C-alpha cells in the first residue's frame, strides 16, 4: 500500500494577520490509499525500460497485424519476380535524374535498372545493379567513359546489359557479357550469336537506325533499308531469330520488332504479323461476355486480314494494334481498357509485365499485371491533353508533356530488398511476423490453460490427485522437447492435411509440450495460499472446494501466472522460429520469421545478401527482448516484497 497526503488549501489574503494573533489553524491531511493493482500499474510505467519495451512491442504488433491486412502476401507466382532476385534494399527505381526531367528521347528497362537518353544526347542510369556479387567490370550502372564523352542518339537496356549508338555511328555495349551480349569474350560465346564485326570494328549510319532494342541477354538493330543486326543468347532468348531475319531479308522488310523472354516478333511494312517459326502466340484465349465460356481462336482469324500498325511485348505476351484501332493481345488475359469514343491509339509500349497506351488526344491507359502498381495510372493523366509522350519501362512508366516530366508511377523499389525468388522481404516480414506471433500466442494460451488446471487441482487437493498429476507432469517434462516436435512435424509433412490444418496442429503441439513448468509453479503457489486464513474462512462458510480453488485462491496468484505467460510467449515464438528455421515448421511459400531465416542459412547469403537474414533476425530479437523485459518488470512490480523504486 502507498499513501499520499493532500496539502491544505492555500490561505486567503490577509490570513497571515489572523495566524499571527490567533495561531495557525489545524490542517486536515487527506490520506489516500492505492490498490495493489493500481500501485503495480504506476510502478510499471515509472520504469523507463519497460515503457519503451511496451511501445516497441505495440508498434511491432501494429506492424505485423495491421500491415499484413493492408499488404497481404501473395503466395502465387505473382508474388515472385524472377527478374528481381536478391535486390538489396533500395527505393531508387523511380528516381529520375534531374536532367532527364527536362526532356527525354528514350527510357528503357527490363529488370532492376533503367537507362535514359536526354534531349542533349547524354545518357543517365538509375536503379539497382543486378550483379551485386560480381566485379565492377560488369556493373551495368557504370556508364563507359566513351559513352559519356559522345553524343548518343539511341539507347536500350536488356536484363543485364545496355547498348548505345552515338551520333557518329559507334555502337557501345556494357554490363554482363558472358553469353555474347557484346564483344568476343564470355564463357558461353560458342552458344551465342556473335556481335557483327561491322559493329565491333566499324560504324553504322546512325541517322538510318530505325530501331534499337534489347531483350533478355540479346540485342538487335533494325535499319531503314531493312538491314537487321542481332547478337547475344539467341539459343535461349530468341529461338525464332533466324526465321524472323529470313522473313525480313526474303519476303518483306520489318517495320518494328520486339523481344519477349524467349523470342522475337515483329510486323513488316505490309502490316503483317511476323512470328517466324514460333507458334507460341498463334492462338488467343477469349471469353464470351455473355456465357463466360472460354474459347481458343487463331490469331490470324482475329486479325482477319487487317493491317497492323503497331506491336509491343512484355516478357510473356505480345500486343498488336490494327489499323482500325483494335488491340489484340496474346499471352495475357487481363482486360484491355476501353478508349473513349472519338479518341484513337497513338502508340502502345510494353514493360516487363504490363502495357501502356498513349492516345492521340493525350490520354494514358495501362493494363496487365499490377502487382507492383505499374498499371495505376494517375487520374490526371487520363484526361484529354494530359501528356504527349509516355515510356513503359520495365516496372515503371514515365509521362512527359511539352518536354517536361509530368509524372512517373510503378515500382519504386524494395524497402528491405528481395529474396532469391524476387519476393519482397518487407511484405513477407510483415506477414511472417503475423504467423510467428499467432503461433506463439495460440501455443501459450493452450499451455497456460493446461498448466493452470493441473497445477491448481494438484496443489489444492493434494493426496492421490497430486501424486498422479505430478508424476504425469514429470513424464511430459522428461520428453526431449525439440526432437519430439521435429518428429511430429515430419509426420505432419508426410500427411495430406491442408496447410491451415497443419499450422493449427503445430500450434497445438507447441502448447501441449510447454505447460509443465507452469503447472509446477502454480502447484507451489497454491500449496502456500491454501493454508491462509481466508481459505479457512471460506471452508467454514461451506463454500465448495472447487470454488475455493478456482475462484478464491487462483486470483491471488494471477500476477505470477501473468509474468510466466509473457515469458512463455517469447519462448513459443522462438520455438516456432527454430522449427521453421530447421525446415519442420510452417512451410514455404507461407512466410514466418523462422523459415525466412532458413532460406538464408548458407555462406553466400550471409556474406552477399545480408538483408535476407538481418531483418528477420532483428525483428525476432526485438520482439523477444521486449517481451522478456515486460515480463521481468511485471515480476518486479507485482512482488510485494520488492522495493517501491528499483
Image (tube, rainbow, N blue to C red):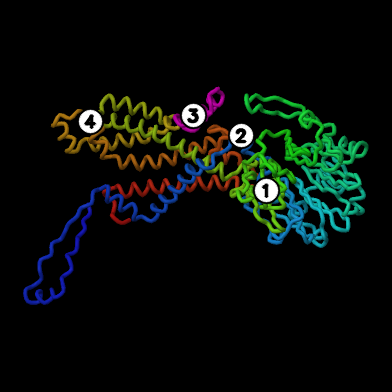
x, y percent for residue 429 = 54, 43
- 235 relative to 570 in the view: left or right: right
Residue range in magenta is 480-509
Residue on which the image places disc 4: 547
| Left or right: 376 in relation to 203 | left
Nearest to N terminus: mark 3 or mark 2: 2
SS for dot 4: helix
Image point 45% across, 44% down: which residue? 61
Indicate the position of residue 336 as horizontal and vertical percent values: 67, 37
- Above or below, comparing residue 31 to residue 336 in the picture: below
Between tags 3 and 2, which lies in front? 2
Of labels 2 and 4, earlier in sequence is: 2
Pointer 2 local density, CA inside 10 Å: few below 14, some 14–19, many at least 20: few
Marks 3/2: CA distance? 32 Å
Of all residues shown, which one is farthest toward the top? 496
Which residue carries the number 1 mark?
363
Query: Which residue in the structure is indicated by mark 3?
Result: 484
The answer to which of marks 2 and 1 sits earlier in the sequence is 2
Whether residue 346 is visible here, answered yes or no, is yes
- Residue under the image location 10 percent in, 71 percent down: 24
Cβ–Cβ under 8 Å for marks 4 and 1:
no
In the picture, residue 464 is in which quadrant? top left
Q: x, y (%) of residue 168?
A: 88, 58
Of the 4 image quadrants, the one containing the C terminus is bottom left
Q: Earlier in the sequence, mark 4 or mark 1?
A: 1
| Residues tagged 2 and 1 counted as in contact (Cβ below 8 A) | no
The residue pinned by badge 2 equals 76
Q: Secondary structure at mark 1?
A: loop
Name the residue nearer the viewer: 29 or 454.
29
Amino acid at each position: 500500500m502507498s499513501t499520499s497526503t493532500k496539502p491544505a488549501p492555500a490561505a486567503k489574503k490577509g490570513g497571515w494577520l489572523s495566524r499571527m494573533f490567533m495561531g495557525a489553524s489545524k490542517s486536515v491531511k487527506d490520506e489516500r490509499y492505492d490498490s495493489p493493482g493500481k500501485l503495480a500499474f504506476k510502478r510499471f510505467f515509472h520504469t523507463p525500460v519497460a515503457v519503451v519495451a511496451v511501445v516497441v512491442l505495440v508498434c511491432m504488433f501494429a506492424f505485423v497485424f495491421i500491415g499484413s491486412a493492408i499488404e497481404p502476401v501473395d503466395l502465387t507466382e505473382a508474388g515472385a519476380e524472377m527478374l528481381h532476385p536478391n535486390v538489396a534494399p533500395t527505393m531508387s527505381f523511380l528516381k529520375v535524374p534531374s536532367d532527364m526531367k527536362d526532356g527525354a528521347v528514350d527510357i528503357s528497362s527490363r529488370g532492376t535498372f533503367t537507362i535514359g537518353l536526354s534531349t542533349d544526347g547524354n545518357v543517365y542510369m538509375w536503379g539497382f545493379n543486378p550483379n551485386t556479387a560480381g566485379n565492377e567490370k560488369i556493373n551495368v550502372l557504370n556508364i563507359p567513359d566513351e559513352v559519356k564523352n559522345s553524343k548518343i542518339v539511341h539507347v536500350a537496356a536488356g536484363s543485364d546489359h545496355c547498348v548505345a549508338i552515338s551520333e557518329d555511328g559507334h555502337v557501345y555495349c556494357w554490363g554482363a557479357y558472358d553469353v555474347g551480349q557484346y564483344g568476343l569474350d564470355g564463357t558461353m560465346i560458342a552458344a551465342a550469336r556473335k556481335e557483327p564485326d561491322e559493329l565491333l570494328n566499324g560504324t553504322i549510319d546512325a541517322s538510318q537506325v530505325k530501331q534499337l532494342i534489347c531483350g533478355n541477354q540479346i540485342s538487335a538493330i533494325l535499319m531503314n533499308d531493312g538491314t537487321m543486326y542481332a547478337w547475344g543468347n539467341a539459343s535461349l532468348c530468341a529461338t525464332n531469330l533466324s526465321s524472323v531475319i529470313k522473313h525480313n531479308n526474303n519476303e518483306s522488310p520489318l517495320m518494328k520488332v520486339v523481344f519477349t523472354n524467349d523470342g522475337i516478333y515483329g510486323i513488316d511494312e505490309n502490316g503483317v504479323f511476323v512470328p517466324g517459326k514460333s507458334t507460341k502466340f498463334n492462338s488467343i484465349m477469349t471469353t464470351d461476355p455473355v456465357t463466360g465460356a472460354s474459347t481458343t481462336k487463331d490469331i490470324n482469324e482475329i486479325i482477319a486480314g487487317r493491317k497492323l500498325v503497331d506491336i509491343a511485348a512484355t516478357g510473356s505476351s505480345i500486343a498488336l494494334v490494327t489499323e482500325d484501332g483494335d488491340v489484340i493481345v496474346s499471352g495475357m488475359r487481363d482486360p484491355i481498357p476501353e478508349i473513349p469514343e472519338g479518341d484513337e491509339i497513338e502508340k502502345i509500349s510494353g514493360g516487363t509485365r504490363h502495357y501502356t497506351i498513349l492516345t492521340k488526344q493525350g490520354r494514358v491507359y495501362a493494363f496487365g499485371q499490377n502487382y507492383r502498381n505499374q498499371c495505376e495510372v494517375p487520374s490526371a493523366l487520363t484526361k484529354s491533353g494530359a501528356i504527349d509522350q509516355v515510356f513503359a519501362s520495365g516496372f515503371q512508366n514515365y509521362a512527359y508533356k511539352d518536354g517536361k516530366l509530368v509524372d512517373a508511377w510503378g515500382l519504386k523499389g524494395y524497402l528491405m530488398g528481395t529474396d532469391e525468388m524476387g519476393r519482397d522481404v518487407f511484405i513477407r516480414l510483415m506477414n511472417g511476423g503475423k504467423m510467428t506471433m499467432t503461433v506463439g500466442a495460440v501455443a501459450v494460451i493452450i499451455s497456460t490453460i493446461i498448466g493452470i488446471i493441473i497445477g491448481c487441482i494438484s496443489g489444492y487437493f493434494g493426496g492421490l490427485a497430486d501424486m498422479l498429476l505430478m508424476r504425469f507432469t514429470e513424464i511430459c517434462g522428461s520428453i526431449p522437447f525439440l526432437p519430439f516436435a521435429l518428429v511430429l512435424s515430419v509426420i505432419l509433412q508426410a500427411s495430406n492435411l491442408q496447410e491451415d490444418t497443419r499450422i493449427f496442429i503445430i500450434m497445438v503441439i507447441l502448447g501441449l509440450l510447454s505447460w509443465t513448468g507452469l503447472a509446477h509453479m502454480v502447484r507451489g503457489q497454491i500449496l502456500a495460499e491454501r493454508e491462509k486464513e481466508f481459505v479457512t474462512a471460506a471452508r467454514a462458510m461451506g463454500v465448495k472446494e472447487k470454488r475455493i480453488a478456482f475462484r478464491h485462491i487462483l486470483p491471488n496468484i494471477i500476477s505470477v501466472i501473468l509474468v510466466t505467460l509473457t515469458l512463455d510467449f517469447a519462448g513459443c515464438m522462438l520455438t516456432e522460429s527454430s522449427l521453421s528455421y530447421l525446415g519442420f515448421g510452417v512451410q514455404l511459400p507461407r512466410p514466418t520469421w523462422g523459415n525466412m531465416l532458413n532460406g538464408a542459412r548458407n555462406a553466400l547469403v550471409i556474406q552477399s545478401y545480408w538483408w535476407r537474414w538481418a531483418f528477420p533476425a532483428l525483428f525476432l530479437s526485438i520482439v523477444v527482448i521486449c517481451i522478456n523485459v515486460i515480463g521481468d518488470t511485471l515480476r518486479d512490480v507485482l512482488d510485494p516484497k520488492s522495493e517501491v523504486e528499483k
